[in-house]
Amino acid sequence: MPTNEKEYNGNLFDQLEIVEETLNLISDKESSAVQYLLKKKSYIERKLYQKPPLTDNNN
């Protein structure tokens, strides 16, 4: 379990990289697997770029 936001974001970037690399390997761009991975990518990005961030950096 991540102990801070930086570690959590690192995990999300790792997940995003795996999804993007997998998308590059699939030749049939209309397949259900591609559609599934694109949906997962959007979920990861939503968590990664959420507003406001998980922690308040002012403290």
Image (cartoon, helix red, strand yellow):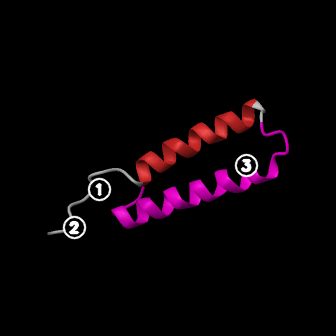
Residue type highlighted by circle 1: Pro
Q: Is residue 46 magenta?
A: no
Q: Distance between the residues labelled 3 and 1?
A: 28 Å
Is label 2 in a helix, a strand or a loop? loop
Q: Determine whether label 2 and label 1 are within 8 Å by CB.
A: yes
Position above or below: 40 against 25: above
Q: Does the magenta stretch include residue 21?
A: yes
Give the residue displayed 43% in from the left and 54% down from the top: 48
Residue type highlighted by circle 2: Asn
Give the residue displayed 77% in from the left and 33% down from the top: 30
Marks 2 and 3, the one that precedes in the sequence: 3
Q: How far apart are marks 2 and 3 (CA)?
A: 34 Å
Query: Where does the magenta region start and end?
Result: 1-29
Is label 1 in a helix, a strand or a loop? loop
Q: Hey, which quadrant is residue 7 in on the image?
A: bottom left
Crowdedness of circle 1 by 10 Å Cα count: few (<14), some, many (20+)?
Answer: few
Q: How far apart are marks 2 and 1 (CA)?
A: 9 Å
Q: Name the residue under label 2.
A: 57
Q: Mark 1 points at which residue?
A: 53
Looking at this view, name the residue that lies furthest to the front. Answer: 30
